[in-house]
Amino acid sequence: MHNANNIDAFFGTQTHCMSDELLNAMDEMVWSPKAPEWFQEFFAGVGVDEEFTVTAEQAQWIIEEASNSYHHPESSENNWEEDFALIVNTFDDYACFLRMLESDGDALRIVTVPRS
């Protein structure tokens, strides 16, 4: 697991909108009664179509937990690969960066370095 001072993270935080598919994927692959308190509170407090924000460390933890489930499934669902891909594509720093580049509007200006 990455340490709390992950200097490799491009985003300090990520903001997303919770879809029904993402909520179900996280329920199947990430949620556990042994999950940290922040995740228990986050998961209980976010609903479908609600915006939520996670820190870089939290996003990394979610991906790692999903990866652990994916590689060591006790019972895999029909959508196991799709669920894992959805979680990674949502929370992966590089995937978020690519979405910013592909989006219209001011997001691209945030990562564009002005030339002198």
Image (cartoon, rainbow, N blue to C red):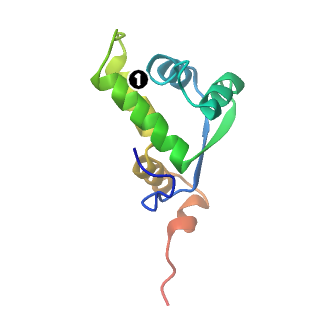
Residue 26: image location, x then y, percent: 50, 24
Position of 36 relative to 15 (above/below): above
Residue placed furthest toward the bottom: 116
Residue 49, image x and y in percent?
A: 67, 27
Location of residue 40 (image quadrant)? top right
Q: Residue 110: percent from the left, percent from the top?
A: 57, 66
Which residue corresponds to the image point at 51% horizontal and 66% vertical from the top-left?
A: 111
Q: Count the labels in the image.
A: 1
Residue 81 falls in image quadrant: top left
Left or right of 87? Residue 52 is: right
Element type at mark 1: helix
* Residue at the limit of the structure toward the front, as seen here: 34
Q: Nearer the viewer, residue 115 or 65?
A: 65
Judging depth in this view, the residue of 36 and 110 nearest the camera is: 36
**Residue for point 40% across, 29% down:** 66
- Viewport quadrant of the N terminus: top left
Question: Would residue 27 be seen by someone viewing this image from the given angle?
Answer: yes
The reply, left or right, for residue 98 in relation to residue 49 is left
Sort mark 1 into few (<14), some (14-19) or many (20+) by Cα contacts within 10 Å.
Answer: many
Residue that numbered label 1 is attached to: 83
Q: Which x, y percent locates residue 108?
A: 53, 62
Relative to 109, does residue 66 appear above or below in the rendering? above
